Image (tube, helix red, strand yellow):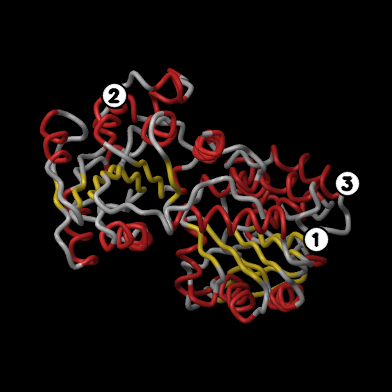
C-alpha cells in the first residue's frame, strides 16, 4: 500500500514550532451551548501527546460551527479546557485566530507547551460560503490573512483533520504550499483504513449500506461495484426499500409517498441500472417489520404491500445478512438498518452490528448516525476501525479526490524532490 504522506510519527519535533490543524468540531447542546460529545477531541489525543512528549512548541487551529450550523459557532475555550483535562497538562487558549495577540502567544511558546488559537470560522476565508463562492486553489490562498499571518512563525505544519478532508479551506490545503508538512496519527490511520478497503480489501468484501441519507449509499455504490471492491452489497434502511422498489416489488402507497416527499424517487432509476449491471452483487431484505396495534410485526417481502411504513428489516433478513458478514474478509458499514431509536425497531440494527462485531473480518464503519447506533448496541473496540469522518469518508469511498489528501500528497512529492 503506497501512502504518499509523511507521517508525524518518528519525526524530531523538539524545539520546533508546530502548527497543528485538528478537527475538534463537536456537537453543542442547544440550550446550554456546552459540548455534548467530545469524541473528536478524544481522537486527537495521540498526536497531541506525541508533540507534548517530544518537546514541540505547538499551536492548535480548529473550527467549530459554520454558516450552515450557526448555532454551533462558539469560541473554543471549552475545547481547551477539555484538552487540558484529558492531557493532564495546561493547554492555553486565546480568543484570537491569527492576529497580533495570537502571534505573540505563538512566539512565546516554550518546549512542550501548547496553545489553542481562536475559532477558525471567525475568519470569512474559512467559512463554507467563502469556499463555495470564491473557489481558490491552494496556491492562490497564500495571500489570505490566515496563511500570511501564521506561516512565517512555524517550522512544521501537521494536519490531523481527516473528517474535514473534503474542505478546500486555507487551513486545510494552503499551509502545505509553504511549510514542511506531516500527517498526524489520526489522519494517517483513517486514510490507511479506508484506502485498504477501497484498494486492497481482503475478500470477500461486503458493504452494508442503510440509513435514511441514501445519497451517501448511492454515492459509493458505482465506484465500489465498478472497481471490484464490493463483492456484495447488503441493503437495509431506506436504501433497502429503494432497491426493493427498483427490483419490481410493490412496497405500497405509503412507502412510495414517503420516498416522493423526501425527493428520493430519483434514486430508483439509478438502482434499476445497478441491478441490471450487477445482478449478483446485491442482497435485499427478504422480510420487513412494521407496527400494528403498538406491537412489532414482521412479514415477508413477498406478502407486501400493506398500508404501512417499514421501519426495520425482519428476522430472516438479519440471519441472511449475518451469514454473509460471517463469511466476509472485509466489511464496510454505513447507516443503521432501521429506526433503531424506537425499541420496536432496533432489532435489525442491533443484529447487524452484533454480526459485524462477532465477525473475523476487517471491519470499518463511519458517519455520525452509524457510529451512534453502533455505540448503542456493541463495544466499538470490536470494530477494526471507526472513522471520524462522515462526508469525507463518503467522498473518499466514492472515488472522489479529497482536497486535503491532494494537498498532503503534493507536499509529500515536493519533499521527495528536494
Q: Which residue is mark 2?
A: 148
Q: Position of residue 357 (x, y in %)?
A: 59, 77
State the residue at coordinates (76%, 57%): 230
- Give me the C-alpha separation between circle 3 and circle 2: 51 Å
The image quadrant of residue 301 is bottom right
Q: CA distance from mark 1 to mark 3?
A: 13 Å
Residue at screen point 28% across, 28% down: 146
Image quadrant where one finds the N terminus: bottom right
Q: Give the structural element (helix, strand or loop) at label 3.
A: helix
Q: Earlier in the sequence, mark 1 or mark 3?
A: 1
In terms of depth relative to the viewer, which is nearer, 394 or 50?
Answer: 50
383 relative to 217, above or below: below
Closer to the chain start, of discs 2 and 1, is 2
Tag 2's secondary structure? helix
The residue at which mark 3 appears reads as 277
Relative side of 375 to 235, left or right: left
Q: CA distance from mark 2 to mark 1?
A: 48 Å
Instruction: Kindly state the secondary structure of the residue where label 1 is placed.
Output: loop
For residue 360, above or below residue 188 = below
Q: Residues within 10 Å of mark 2 (few under 14, many from 20)?
A: some
Where residue 261 appears, as percent x and y from the top left, is: 58, 41
As drawn, 406 above or below 313:
above
Between residue 378 and residue 228, name the one nearer to us: 228
Q: Which residue is drawn at the image coordinates 88% and 54% (left, top)? A: 279
Of callouts 3 and 2, the N-terminal one: 2
Amino acid at each position: 500500500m503506497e501512502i504518499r504522506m509523511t507521517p508525524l510519527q518518528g519525526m524530531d519535533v523538539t524545539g520546533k514550532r508546530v502548527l497543528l490543524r485538528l478537527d475538534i468540531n463537536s456537537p453543542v447542546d442547544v440550550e446550554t451551548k456546552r459540548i455534548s460529545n467530545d469524541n473528536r477531541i478524544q481522537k486527537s489525543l495521540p498526536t497531541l501527546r506525541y508533540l507534548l512528549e517530544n518537546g514541540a512548541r505547538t499551536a492548535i487551529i480548529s473550527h467549530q460551527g459554520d454558516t450552515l450550523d450557526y448555532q454551533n459557532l462558539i469560541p473554543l475555550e471549552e475545547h481547551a479546557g477539555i484538552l487540558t483535562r484529558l492531557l493532564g497538562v495546561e493547554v492555553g487558549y486565546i480568543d484570537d485566530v491569527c492576529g497580533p495577540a495570537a502571534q505573540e502567544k505563538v512566539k512565546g511558546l516554550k518546549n512542550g507547551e501548547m496553545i489553542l488559537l481562536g475559532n477558525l470560522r471567525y475568519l470569512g476565508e474559512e467559512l463554507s460560503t467563502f469556499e463555495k463562492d470564491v473557489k481558490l486553489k491552494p496556491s492562490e490562498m497564500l495571500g489570505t490573512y490566515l496563511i500570511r499571518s501564521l506561516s512565517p512563525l512555524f517550522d512544521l505544519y501537521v494536519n490531523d483533520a481527516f473528517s474535514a478532508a473534503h474542505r478546500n479551506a486555507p487551513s486545510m490545503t494552503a499551509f502545505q504550499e509553504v511549510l514542511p508538512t506531516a500527517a498526524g496519527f489520526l489522519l494517517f490511520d483513517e486514510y490507511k483504513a479506508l484506502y485498504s478497503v477501497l484498494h486492497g480489501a481482503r475478500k470477500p468484501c461486503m458493504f452494508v449500506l442503510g440509513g435514511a441519507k441514501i445519497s451517501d449509499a448511492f454515492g459509493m455504490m458505482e465506484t465500489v461495484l465498478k472497481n471490484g471492491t464490493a463483492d456484495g452489497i447488503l441493503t437495509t434502511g431506506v436504501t433497502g426499500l429503494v432497491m426493493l422498489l427498483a427490483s419490481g416489488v410493490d412496497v405500497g402507497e405509503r412507502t412510495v409517498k414517503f420516498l416522493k416527499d423526501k425527493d428520493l424517487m430519483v434514486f430508483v432509476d439509478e438502482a434499476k441500472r445497478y441491478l441490471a449491471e450487477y445482478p449478483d452483487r446485491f442482497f435485499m431484505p427478504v422480510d420487513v417489520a412494521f407496527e400494528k396495534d403498538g406491537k412489532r410485526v414482521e412479514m415477508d417481502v413477498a406478502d407486501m404491500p400493506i398500508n404501512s411504513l417499514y421501519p426495520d428489516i425482519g428476522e430472516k433478513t438479519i440471519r441472511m445478512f449475518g451469514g454473509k458478514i460471517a463469511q466476509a474478509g472485509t466489511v464496510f458499514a454505513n447507516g443503521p438498518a432501521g429506526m433503531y431509536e424506537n425499541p420496536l425497531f432496533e432489532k435489525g440494527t442491533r443484529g447487524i452490528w452484533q454480526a459485524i462485531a462477532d465477525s473475523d473480518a476487517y471491519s470499518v464503519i463511519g458517519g455520525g448516525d452509524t457510529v451512534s447506533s453502533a455505540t448503542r448496541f456493541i463495544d466499538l473496540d470490536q470494530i477494526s476501525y471507526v472513522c471520524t469522518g462522515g462526508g469525507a469518508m463518503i467522498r473518499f469511498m466514492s472515488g472522489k479526490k479529497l482536497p486535503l489528501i491532494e494537498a498532503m500528497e503534493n507536499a509529500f512529492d515536493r519533499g521527495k524532490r528536494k
